[in-house]
Each structure stands twice: as C-alpha cells, then as structure tokens.
Image (tube, rainbow, N blue to C red):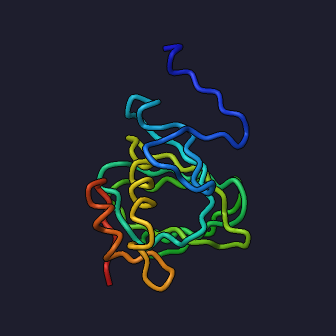
Amino acid sequence: MADRFLFLEPGQARPGRAPLPPAFAVKATTEDTEGRFSLLEVTLGQDIPRHVHHEPDEAVYVLSGELLVDYDGHTHRAGAGTFVLLPHGIPHALRRGSTPPPRVLQISSPGGWEHYVEDLFAAGPAVFTDGALDPVKINRVAAPHGITYEEG
C-alpha cells in the first residue's frame, strides 16, 4: 500500500483533529495504520494517574530520562532503552522520574490514543485541580475512549 507510506523528518508530526503541544508529537495516526495502532513521541510533563485501558494494549519505549511505572503494586524505574508493555485491563500509572522529564515512544494497539489526547487538550484546564490531572474530571473525557481513571 504505497499510499500509506510515511516518512517524517526529525521534529515532524502528523496533523490531527486538534493541535497538540510539542510534547505530544503524533508520528502515526490510527487512520494511517487502518486502526491497527497509533504512535506518539511524548515528553511526560505531567504524572499520569492510575488508570485502566479497557481495550488497547499500551507499549512504551523510553528514549531519554527516567519513567516511573506503577504496575501490580510495584514501582518500576525505566531508563533510556527500557521497553514496557502495559496490557489492557490492568491498572497502571506513569510518573516522571527525572528532570528533564522522560521522553518516550508510546504505541497503542489498536489505535486511538491520539484522539483521546486531542480531546484531553481540548478540555483544557477543566481536567485539572491544583495543577494536577484530576481523575474525577478526566474520566468525563476518558470514558468515550475506553479509559477509566481511579478516583479517590
């Protein structure tokens, strides 16, 4: 399928439904991959509270810095070159373990993660409380994407 070929230079990103900040560079959209996956290069500027993806598996490859992964009652330190597979249905959280914050490749299969991120940024400050992502507020945006954040 030559019409699906993509070649992005360093710093380039795919356009989406809504503009995203540079910390979220979409490299392959769900539409690019016929729904199979989406791929983003992400700088984790905010800790991601404990949540569950009900359908997609999430794969994370750490490019730089240190990512803290809370999974199955343990905190795992993921430095550059580390790969993490987060299966659907299992609660997990992602936190910054370094300054500057970690930079990762994030793959969601099947795709769709970039649409959730677009909706999250479109919601703006409405999903924050005291500068942090608020699970109660974020669930309104996450639910249509099959993601549930633990409240309380």
Determine the residue positioned at 47% across, 38% down.
29
Which quadrant holds residue 53? bottom left
Q: Is residue 12 left or right of residue 121?
A: right
For the C terminus, give its image quadrant. Answer: bottom left
In depth, the one of 122 and 33 nearer the eye is 122
Report how many numbered discs are placed on residues in the image: 0
Determine the residue positioned at 35% across, 54% down.
88
Position of residue 125 measured from the top left corner of the image (x, y, whole percent): 44, 73
Determine the residue positioned at 61% across, 41% down.
13
Looking at this rendering, what residue extends furthest in the top direction?
Answer: 2
Position of residue 105 measured from the top left corner of the image (x, y, whole percent): 60, 49
In depth, the one of 56 and 87 nearer the eye is 56
Q: Is residue 114 left or right of residue 25?
A: left
Indicate whether 147 appears above or below 76: above
Q: Is residue 94 left or right of residue 87?
A: right
Position of residue 43 measured from the top left corner of the image (x, y, whole percent): 63, 60
Which quadrant holds residue 135? bottom left
Q: Is residue 71 left or right of residue 56?
A: right
In depth, the one of 95 and 76 nearer the eye is 95
Position of residue 41 measured from the top left corner of the image (x, y, whole percent): 60, 49
Determine the residue positioned at 39% across, 72% down.
127
